Amino acid sequence: DVKVTQSSRYLVKRTGEKVFLECVQDMDHENMFWYRQDPGLGLRLIYFSYDVKMKEKGDIPEGYSVSREKKERFSLILESASTNQTSMYLCASSPQTRGLNKNIQYFGAGTRLSVL
Amino acid sequence: AQSVSQHNHHVILSEAASLELGCNYSYGGTVNLFWYVQYPGQHLQLLLKYFSGDPLVKGIKGFEAEFIKSKFSFNLRKPSVQWSDTAEYFCAVLRRYYGNNRLAFGKGNQVVVIP
């Protein structure tokens, strides 16, 4: 089974703090994604990466950055956390290879971040 | 704007009732379509997918979905729900964006099944 592991389930930070959310996948997937999930808004894509050291902005990248130094690890960074970044953050990965599993995204359990 | 629409965000029904969740998208061309489910306290997982071929696809736990190209729809159905189907359901469409494939999600349907 594909395993996508997010380092924290719950996180509480203060406004202005720098926050790191870590995600690791064990299936050698090329693509990795960060979403935020808010009630009534569904999942919105923040950033994604299709290769090591590559990153692309999603639909709501403002206030976030990412880092992908190794294939299995994709980090989301909040440079200066704000209260409107309180949310559930989901990491996902998917393979680029051909076949039935192409484009299927596998999700981590999520990190619920509260910014006070 | 291109989007994925899910209606009736909150759905409450009794066990054994039939469930149908609508999903409409506005992207043109070839699409890959997905339904994901998130059970309480659990991670998001794939329920079923459509890439090509038979437009009626079957997924896990008795769910099925029908792709109707002319209506830009991919509705999810289950003939008889159980209490364990209480979950949030998300429709997603794979779209090509500047050479990369990205999923666009609907806003979700919160389904509560009453025993």
Image (cartoon, coloured by chain):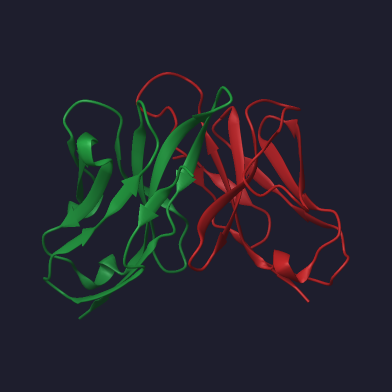
Task: Relative to B48, say whether A29 is above or below.
Answer: above
The residue positioned 42% from the left and 53% from the top of the image is: B106
Quarter where residue A103 is shown: top left
Name the spot of residue B31 as percent of width and height, x first: 36, 31
| Image position of A64 (left or right of A15) | left
Q: Nearer the viewer, residue A24 or B8?
A: B8
| Quarter the N terminus of chain A occupies | top left
Chain A drawing hue? red
Name the spot of residue B33 as percent of width and height, x first: 34, 38
* The furthest residue to the front: B1
Name the spot of residue A64 as percent of width and height, x first: 76, 50
The residue positioned 46% from the left and 33% from the top of the image is: B95
| Quarter the C terminus of chain A occupies | bottom right
| Image position of A14 (left or right of A93) | right
The residue positioned 35% from the left and 57% from the top of the image is: B6
* The furthest residue to the top: A98
* The furthest residue to the bottom: B115
Task: Relative to A69, say whether B93 is above or below.
Answer: below
Q: What letter labels the chain drawn in green? A: B
Quarter where residue A78 is shown: bottom right
The residue positioned 58% from the left and 31% from the top of the image is: A31
Q: How many marks?
A: 0
Name the spot of residue A97 as percent of width and height, x first: 47, 20
